[in-house]
């Protein structure tokens, strides 16, 4: 029985099959199947005066003549593409149909398109990837010069490049010729060429529609449908390898990094130079005889040879983190702390005694700390993070120290209000710029520059009176889900469900006036308008006095909004066990319980909140 092979368009154009017939790699023990789709695609390209079409049709003629001469079975299979198939050709529809023919014929797909090859293998279809040596004119390094930070190649667009240095760069066109699919395919195939295994050092991430790989010192991201609507190749390279001396650092900071700091966050905007600074810290620790490892995906930090770079395992670091405890590093650089599990893992490794340096995206230095709030307990944050270094434009812009103390928070004077407070101090001035503490069920971040220190000593300070009388208890009588913002010493704003506003205002404003008299402050009442994202599937369970809405664990820590038809019932955060907890005795609980009993659960909808309210 002859071996069946199906040819796709790319390998026909590449001219490999006729060469294999000449070298007897393909003989009369094979049956060659040519998809009608491939013939029609080549004809279409030829009609548009594209060289690939003429080359492919000429190659098909050669293959047929050689098969007849050598008595190799050859036939055409499949149907002509429909109008919808042609319209979707750019999105890979033709390639997918050719894969279907190979699967239906139980044949091996021969292709010169590496992405097509990987897609076939992922679909359980036998595939062989082969191609002639790609010309070096398709080397992506050709688009770089000495000042280029990154190159952006997009189908149908002129090549673009960011040139300059972090914080001082511009986006420029580097050619007037628009890129087509054929050119981008050649660049991709050059990168993936099996004939030169020195080109690609690592394929870091691979899934349907996306590849992230390292080519020499370039980090390359390739996207195509369905992830993006067209092919895009982004290549980024480090401009310069720096040491700590290049940052003109204060000796006290170098001393802190060398001796005291063991929970460091390097924060900054994308492209600000965070990873470059992290690499310089790695060099510093290695030169001081410290054992350093990295956790990163992709593995693109420029670190010394004796630093082992660990990647993720099946999109997660958990198992790799277990290995780190066995190899006992002094410091681990965690590049891109972003997902909830990353924050938890960073904290877990730090609390085991490993020195941790985390690289994190943030618009301001304080934002890097805020991103840990809600992921780990507030009191644990100073034990996990002791130093925050904010990088802006490739330079150190701000440095914070964190310390946990027990005190009366700024703005309060009564001693019975003392509690654990996280102090955030400027490294150089040693002044406390922010305090973080728990008040009720909320975590409060207070910028001390906004507090009038003369008023802080005033026993008539109305903020203190509000704290003592627990303003949430007063407002909670009217709306248990109210959100409260302190605007000034004598003014607060409350956000409530719009249905509750008449109840709080009262006839002629009588109720709100009475509340203002009780609290001694001016109150602004506004309707709570949640910003909702996508709908979240959930299931319902009961246990004792509780009702639980159970969601997928990917939503842990996210803020969600629960609606009954058009009415917002509750805005809250998903707990660590993937559950939203509701008390049956509350107003919301009674409504939800009645819905459950009436078997009308479809009227309940759960949506992700796009933004979180900050108090």
Image (tube, grey):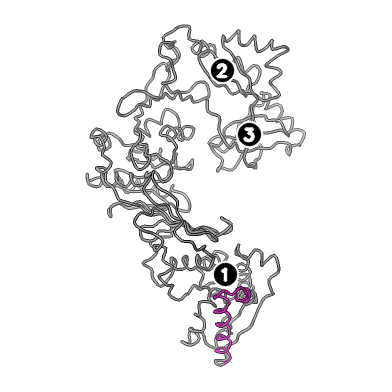
Q: Residue at x 44, y 38 (%)?
A: 362
Mark 1 is surrounded, within 10 Å at the Cα level, by few (under 14), some (14 to 19) or many (20 or more) other residues, namely many
Residue 271 vertical placement versus 449 (above, below): below
Residue that lies at the very extreme toward the right in this rendered image: 598
Q: Position of residue 230 (x, y in %)?
A: 56, 59
Q: Which residues are magenta?
A: 43-68
How many marks the image carries: the answer is: 3
**Is residue 597 or residue 119 the one in the foreground?**
119
**Is residue 532 or residue 218 the one in the foreground?**
218
The disc at residue 561 is: 3
- Mark with earlier residue (1, 2): 1
Residue 446 vertical placement versus 101 (above, below): above
The disc at residue 125 is: 1
Q: Position of residue 245 (x, y in %)?
A: 24, 42
- Mark with earlier residue (1, 3): 1
The disc at residue 492 is: 2
Per the image, is 86 magenta?
no
Question: Looking at the figure, which quarter contains the N terminus?
Answer: bottom right
Q: Residue at x 73, y 12 (%)?
A: 507
Mark 2 is surrounded, within 10 Å at the Cα level, by few (under 14), some (14 to 19) or many (20 or more) other residues, namely some
- Tell me where residue 305 sits by quadrant: bottom left
Give the label, 3 or 2, closer to the camera: 2
**Is residue 509 or residue 519 the one in the foreground?**
509
* Element type where label 1 sits in the image: loop
- Mark with earlier residue (3, 2): 2
* Element type where label 3 sits in the image: strand
- Tell me where residue 155 sits by quadrant: bottom right
3D distance between C-alphas at marks 3 and 2: 24 Å
């Amino acid at each position: 029985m002859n071996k069946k092979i199906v040819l796709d368009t790319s390998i026909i154009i590449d001219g490999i099959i006729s060469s294999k017939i000449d070298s007897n790699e393909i003989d009369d023990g094979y049956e060659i199947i040519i998809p009608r789709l491939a013939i029609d695609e080549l004809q279409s390209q030829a009609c548009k005066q594209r060289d690939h079409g003429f080359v492919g049709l000429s190659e098909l003629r050669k293959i047929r003549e050689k098969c007849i001469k050598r008595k190799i079975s050859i036939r055409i299979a499949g149907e002509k593409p429909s109008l919808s198939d042609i319209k979707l050709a750019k999105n890979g529809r033709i390639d997918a149909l050719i894969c279907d023919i190979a699967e239906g014929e139980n044949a091996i797909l021969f292709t010169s398109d590496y992405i097509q090859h990987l897609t076939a293998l992922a679909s359980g279809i036998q595939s062989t990837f082969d191609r002639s040596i790609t010309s070096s004119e398709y080397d992506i390094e050709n688009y770089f010069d000495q000042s280029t930070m990154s190159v952006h190649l997009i189908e149908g667009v002129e090549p673009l490049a960011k040139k300059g240095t972090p914080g001082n760069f511009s986006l420029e066109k580097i050619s007037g010729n628009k890129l087509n699919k054929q050119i981008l395919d050649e660049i991709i195939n050059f990168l993936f060429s099996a004939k030169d295994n020195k080109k690609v050092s690592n394929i870091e991430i691979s899934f349907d529609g996306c590849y992230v790989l390292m080519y020499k010192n370039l980090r390359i991201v390739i996207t195509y449908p369905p992830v993006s609507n067209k092919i895009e190749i982004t290549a980024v390279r480090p401009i310069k390898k720096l040491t700590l001396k290049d940052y003109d650092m204060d000796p006290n900071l170098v001393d802190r990094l060398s001796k005291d700091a063991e929970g460091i966050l390097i924060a900054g905007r994308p492209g600000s130079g965070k990873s470059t600074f992290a690499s310089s810290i790695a060099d510093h620790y290695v030169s001081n005889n410290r054992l350093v490892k990295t956790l990163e995906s992709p593995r693109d930090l420029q670190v010394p040879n004796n630093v082992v770079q660990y990647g993720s395992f099946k999109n997660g670091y958990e198992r790799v983190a277990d290995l780190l405890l066995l190899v006992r590093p002094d410091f681990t650089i965690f590049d891109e702390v972003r997902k909830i599990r990353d924050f938890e893992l960073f904290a877990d490794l730090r609390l085991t005694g490993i020195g941790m340096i985390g690289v994190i995206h943030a618009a301001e230095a304080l934002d890097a700390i805020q991103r840990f709030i809600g992921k780990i307990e507030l009191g644990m944050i100073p034990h996990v993070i002791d130093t925050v270094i904010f990088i802006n434009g490739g330079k150190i812009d701000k440095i914070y120290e964190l310390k946990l103390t027990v005190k009366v928070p700024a703005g309060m004077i009564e001693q019975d209000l003392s509690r654990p407070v996280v102090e955030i101090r400027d490294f150089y001035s040693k002044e406390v710029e922010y305090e973080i503490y728990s008040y009720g069920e909320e975590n409060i971040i207070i910028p001390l520059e906004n507090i009038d220190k003369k008023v802080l000593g005033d026993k008539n300070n109305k903020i203190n009176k509000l704290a003592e009388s627990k303003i949430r208890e007063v407002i909670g009588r009217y709306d248990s889900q109210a959100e409260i913002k302190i605007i000034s010493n004598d003014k607060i704003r409350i956000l409530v469900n719009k249905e509750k506003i008449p109840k709080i205002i009262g006839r002629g404003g009588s109720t709100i006036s009475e509340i203002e008299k009780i609290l001694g402050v001016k109150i602004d009442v506004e309707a709570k308008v949640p910003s909702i994202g996508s709908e979240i599937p959930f299931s319902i369970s009961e246990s004792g006095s509780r009702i639980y809405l159970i969601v997928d664990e990917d939503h842990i820590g996210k803020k969600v909004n629960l609606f009954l038809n058009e009415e917002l019932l509750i805005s809250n955060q998903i707990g660590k066990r993937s559950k939203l907890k509701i008390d049956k005795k509350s107003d919301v609980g009674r409504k939800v319980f009645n819905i459950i009993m009436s078997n009308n659960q479809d009227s309940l909808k759960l949506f992700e909140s796009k933004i979180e309210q900050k108090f």
